[in-house]
Each structure stands twice: as C-alpha cells, then as structure tokens.
Amino acid sequence: MKNDANPAALMALSPLDGRYQQQMTPLQAYFSEQALMRYRLVVEVRWLQALAAEDAIVEVEPFQADDQALLQQIMDHFGTDDAERIKQLERVTNHDVKAVEYFLRERLADTRLERCSRMIHFACTSEDVTNLAYAMIIHAARDEVLLPWLDRVIQSMVRLAQDHRAVAMLSRTHGQPASPTTLGKEMAIFADRLRRQRDQMAAVRLPGKINGAVGNFNAHQVAYPEVDWLGLTSKLLTGMGLEPRLLTTQIEPHDELAALCHAMMRCNTVLLDFDRDVWGYIAMGYFRQKLKAHEVGSSTMPHKVNPIDFENSEGNIGLANALLGHLADKLPVSRWQRDLSDSTVLRNVGVAFGHTLLALQATDRGIGKLEVNHAVIAADLNQNWEVLAEAIQTVMRRHGMDQAYEQLKELTRGRRIGPDELHAFVATLPLPQPVQQRLLALTPEGYTGLAELLVAKMPVNIVTR
C-alpha cells in the first residue's frame, strides 16, 4: 500500500519505509532510530533513579516529587527535536549511547538535578543501556503490535471454521482425492495451530543485564563496596519487566531473544501453510474472492481475480523468517567477552517484525475477501464416489470378510466410479441388512466423520462466539 502523500517514501531504499510505510506506522514507535534513542534515555533515567534510591550512594540525594516529575517529563515528551540533538552530539562523540548520556546532562543543566548529572551512566558500558532498551522495545512491539494482529488473524480463521463447519469438502492427500472433511474443520486446524505457537511466542520473557564492562560489577564494587549491587540491579530489572541476567560477559547473551525469533518463525510457518492451502482452494474454485469495482487482476487478462493477499503474505513470511533465522543463529554468538557484530544485526529486528506484520495484515485482508463456492465443492465431491471405498472395506473387515481391502482396491484403484457401481458392489456383500442399508445410504457429502463436532469442540480460548 503506497504512501503517495509522502515524497520521501518514493525515494526509500526499503519497501517497509516506502511502499508499505503507512502499514508500518504501528512499529515506528518501537523500531525507528528515534524510538531507540528514547528507550535508551529511559534506561539512563531509570538507572539514575535507582542510584538515588540507594541509601549508601550519598552523592545522589533522594529525588523529590518535583525531581521525578522533571525526569518523567523528559521521557514522556521526547520528540524529533530531541532526537536531532542527540544526532548532533553523536557526530561529535561518534558514539550513539554516549550522545544520549550527554543529552540527558544537557536537559538537567540549570535544574536541581544538575548536581547529580555526573552520575548519569555511572559504571555502565553502552551495552548495559542498549540491551535493556532493546528488551523493552521488543517486549512492547510484540505485545502491542504483533500479538494483537496474530489474535485478529486467529479470530478470522475461527470465524471461517465456525461459519463453514458443516460444509463437506473433498480432502486431498498427496494431491489425490481422499476421505471427505469439512471446510470449517480444515480452517479450525490452522486457528488451533497458530494459537499454540502464538502462546509460546507470548510466553518468552527477555532478560536484561546492567553489570558493567565484563559482567562482574568491577567498577561498581570498587566505587561503592558497601552497596548490594546484585540486589539493586535485580530490583531495577524486575521493575522494568525484565528477567535479571546475572551471569554475562559484556553483553546479554541473547538466548531468549533467539527463542523469541524461533517462536515467531513457527507462527509465520503456520501462517505460510494456511496461505498456500487457501491459495490452492481458490485455484480449485472452492473459494471465490469478493470483487472491488476498480481493481485490476491482470494488466492483460481482464477476467483475472488473483489471490494477491495470500501471495503477498507468503513473500513477506519468507523475508521475515530469513531475518529471524539469522538473528537466532547469530546473536547468541559473541567472541570472548564482547565483539560488536551483534550491534548492526540488532538494528534489523524491526525489519523482521515489519515483514511479519505485513504478512499478518495481508492474510487477514485475504480472508476478508473469501466467499465459499458451494456448487464447486459439491460437484467435486459428487465426482469422486470412490472415496467411499475406505468406509466400505473397513465395515467389511468388522464383519469378518477376507480380502476386504483387496476387493475395494480392485474395484476403485485409479478409477473414477459412481454411485451405481458402488451400490451394486455393496448389494453383493453378506452384511446384516441395517449395515448394508447404512452403506447404501452413504454419500461423499455425508462421509465426514466427526469433523463438525471437532470444530464445535475447539478449545475455548480460540472460540469467539
């Protein structure tokens, strides 16, 4: 979806910032460079507040209500002008985190807190600030953007399942006609699968560290040996919604972030499987797509209504999972106590989130255009009476008949037969009359087992009505 109102979007190198800019708006609050600056600023403020609350650190007096209000205002009103000032400072320092530190010092100048500005970034390495910033960013973007969209897609699948739970449909195993199912039950499978993976993704809690240059609180302990640094930092991290990570090198090892990436990949893989199945059902005519009067399907073939939403989703899933896979493989690996190879990679977490978001939006949009073509589905069933061979040979086995499978194989394998041939065969079987009548009354449309009941028994947490 192009943003023609913004000329800069037409010159963007990445389609996320160009063609799809409007759809990326929810993620800009988390993954833009300005957002990273703000979250780093939040970490610097929280650390300063933690130091001020520690009795043993007498060089920083406890903050009064006005002091806390000032710090909160600096965080809450951080905007483009502030981000531009940090970039100016970075051009001098050539260090993005140090620029945030100097910016905060500037903001505290000529206030009551100027006296403690020397304690900003106290005993911290830049990674102490950055790992916490990214942990908060990723938690927030997952919880406030991706999970709501996942829930939306899951509910769309649930509606498909419930609305069409009784619509009998020919299955295809290995691409060949197989025992019938219902359209709703097949949709319910994806809703259930996606919810399970969504819950695993939501359960990942990222840890954080703020323990200095190599993770030992070296400078902290020399400066204030009387302070319980383990307790102070654990309390701070827990208050920020993070799991305290005590044993680290200079960097937080990123193992849980890798787990989150893998969980996202599994969600995307389920979505991809759904996209391809629905694409196939559209190709077979099981689904029609709602028309929009002025849209064009093909630049040369006027009749075309292409399943572009599911194709768009599939393409974005490929990009997202390639990035997520690299993030999961690379980030937990760092030479000795620190190398910088994770830094540029981490800046692309938002790109992986962006392509995932595009995929979710496209799939949900595609689902909204689907209409069931009952006539095509019914005709396909009616042309494949041979799928009842499974039921007949299974009943024959129950009643002690030898060579049941082989007899039905001889009758049906590789052949398309109709009701007359099947009924003639059933009529020759020495079965109890009620059993024989039940087989004679069986049709492909009625041979769906417990499919409808399975939809009715979907787990409560994914049923919308």
Image (tube, grey):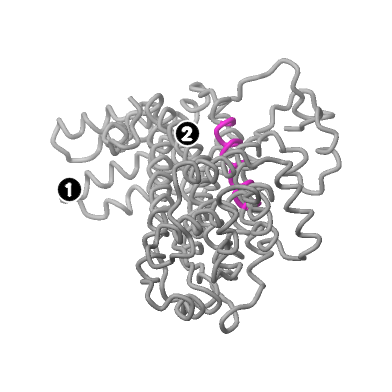
Please report the residue visible at 26 percent of the width from the left and 35 percent of the height from the top.
457
On the question of residue 439 being in view, the answer is: yes
Q: Amino acid at mark 1?
A: Arg
**Could you say where residue 298 lies in the image, as x and y percent from the top left?**
78, 30
Three-letter amino acid code at disc 2? Arg
Residue 416: percent from left, percent from top: 48, 39
Q: Secondary structure at mark 2?
A: helix
Asked if 36 appears above or below 6 in the picture, the reply is below
Q: Position of residue 135 (x, y in %)?
A: 51, 57
Residue, x 60% and y 54% (percent of image)?
Answer: 114
Label annotation for residue 432 = none
Whether residue 418 is visible, yes or no, is no
Q: Disc 1 designates what residue?
A: 398
State whether residue 108 is above or below residue 359: below
Magenta residues (range): 350-366
Q: Nearer the viewer, residue 460 or 435?
A: 460
- The answer for how far apart the CA atoms under marks 1 and 2 are is 46 Å
Q: Is residue 355 magenta?
A: yes
Residue nearer the viewer, 47 or 436: 47
